[in-house]
Image: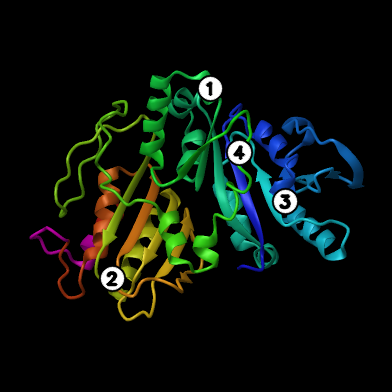
Amino acid sequence: MADRIPITLLTGFLGAGKTTMLNRLLHDPQAGRIAVIVNEFGEAGLDHDLIEDVAEDVVLMESGCICCTIRSDLSRTLADLHDRLDAGTLAFDRVVIETTGLADPGPIHHTLMLDDQIARRFRLDGIVTVVDAVHGTATLDRHAEAQAQVAMADRIVLTKCDLVATTDRATLERELDALNPQAARLQADRGALPPGCLFDLSTRRSSGNGLAALKWVGEVVDPLAGLSGIKAAAPAPAALPGFPSTAPHHARQNSISTASITIDSPIPAPVFDFWMDMLLGTQGQLILRLKAIVHIEGAQCPFVLHGVQHMLEAPVPLKDWPKDDQTSRVVLIARDLSVAHLAGTLELLKLKPGTARPPGSGDTLSPQAARDLTAG
């Protein structure tokens, strides 16, 4: 994975400030040589400062970066860029794909995983989502696409913060906490950011570094805590039968929920396999993102797992995990599933072979009952 070219997905709703940020990035020599893929030059509005037309739909900038448009599809565009890199007609170290304001990052991630030619040459480095601090709260309330972009982000960049009142900024922060509490947040100053802060986010997967993996997963918290400041919406669905009751929570009007869990002792392999089969088989299309460090019984080291919707990347072993730490950490971000449902799904990881009982419950949980639970 370390030999493949890193790709950053830059997403954000219409008017969030992606173009301004890209302009600043492409004119910063410290950012390195970047290939930027956009849908249309005119639509993106990039200030290219062209010095040379390298080829059709490809332009070279003074900073050494290049820009190109998506030709017929993303796979072909990436293949063309790599062919030119091999031929020595272009030089770049990484790729930034600017999505449209209404785009779901999921299909792009699938392309990077499922296209064999692309997967051998490129890897996803991270998803960066730009949020307009002035209109962000209203946008998140009204548009499911904006909610999904925030929920799937590895890093969130706030723009136009100088134009928003402190109380409105706090409201937006609570909205972001509800959608994606794990993603680190940055504040752009008129589109400018410290060099490199948007890149090398995938060290959690490619290098096997334990500390980087922990930072990537983020703080694992009680999924039903801290939501009292969020706008009330329809009542949350009841907790899953057979699991401990959970306190009611106030949900946003969106349908995106986040839940996480820590498990102190190693997870039996049959339990984890069963849980993963049930999760992907019955809820895969609803899972926007899965991020996990799992310690399986009998394994020499923990593994990092990363999935988007029903697609799961190959597990990556951690090389430098502390020997006395066997804690597993799993984070789920999903659409159209309640927090209580996600929390109950995660509790299945605490089952022990032969007991068939959900943690904290006196009721027997048969395999079929478990399937019924995870199927909702």
Nearest-to-viewer mark from 2 and 3: 3
Q: Tag 3: residue type?
A: Gly
Disc nearer the start of the sequence (2/3): 3
Magenta span: helix, strand or loop, mainly? loop
Q: Is residue 345 magenta?
A: no
* Side (left or right) of 243 relative to 59: left
* Side (left or right) of 323 relative to 119: left
Residue 187 sits above or below residue 265 on the image: above
Disc 1 to disc 4: CB gap under 8 Å: no
User: What distance separates the C-alpha of mark 1 from that of mark 3?
Assistant: 28 Å
Which residues are the magenta region? 359-370
Disc nearer the start of the sequence (3/4): 3
Q: Quadrant of residue 210?
A: bottom left
Disc nearer the start of the sequence (1/2): 1
Question: Percent x, y for residue 131?
Answer: 53, 32
Q: Which residue is mark 2?
A: 271
Disc nearer the start of the sequence (4/2): 4
Q: Which residue is mark 4?
A: 193
Q: Which residue is mark 1?
A: 162
The kind of secondary structure element at disc 4 is loop
Q: Quadrant of residue 340?
A: top left
What residue is drawn where x is 43% and y is 62%?
Answer: 211
